Image (cartoon, rainbow, N blue to C red):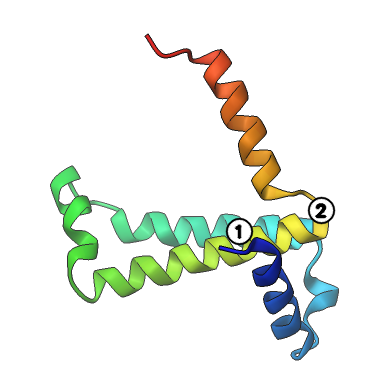
Amino acid sequence: MDLSAWQQRLLAFAAARDWPPYLNPKNLAMALSVEVAELVECYQWLDPDQSRRLTHDEPGRTQVADEMADVLMYLLHLARETGIDLEAACEAKIQRNAQKYPAP
């Protein structure tokens, strides 16, 4: 996945709708939390086995995919707005986690 290309595509989509003034870090972080909550809602009240099966069939598969896409798109907007390179951030974080939680 080319994150930069997706960020530009999302920005072009937003610009065509005059949304860029609303795409600031505060608004994007708030919107991201709402979308994560909507993803959580898909799984609310399911037992572990039901949660594993939710995406095997419709409508669960599309509902979860839509919410995951919303989360990713807001995260990509937020990374662009803050100048954070997500790939570099993930690499650095996994290295810190490996030091903090060494494998037995």
Residue at image location 14% in from the left, 47% down from the top: 49
Out of 77 and 104, give the one closest to the viewer.
Answer: 104
Q: Which residue is mark 1?
A: 32
Among the 4 quarters of the image, the one containing residue 5: bottom right
Where residue 79 sits: x, y (%)? 73, 55
Q: Residues within 10 Å of mark 2 (few under 14, many from 20)?
A: few
Where residue 19 sits: x, y (%)? 77, 81
Out of 71 and 10, give the one closest to the viewer.
Answer: 10
Amino acid carrying mark 1 in the image = Leu
Amino acid carrying mark 2 in the image = Thr
Residue at image location 18% in from the left, 65% down from the top: 56
Q: Residues within 10 Å of mark 1 (few under 14, many from 20)?
A: many
Where residue 88 sits: x, y (%)? 70, 42
Among the 4 quarters of the image, the one containing residue 24: bottom right
Residue at image location 76% in from the left, 91% down from the top: 16
Q: Quadrant of the N terminus?
A: bottom right
Where residue 46 sits: x, y (%)? 21, 51
**Residue 82: image tag:** 2
- Residue projecting furthest to the front: 2
Q: Is residue 56 left or right of residue 41?
A: left
Label 1 secondary element: helix
Out of 85 and 33, give the one closest to the viewer.
Answer: 85
Residue 18 higher or lower than 89, as above or below: below
Residue 66 higher or lower than 53, as above or below: below
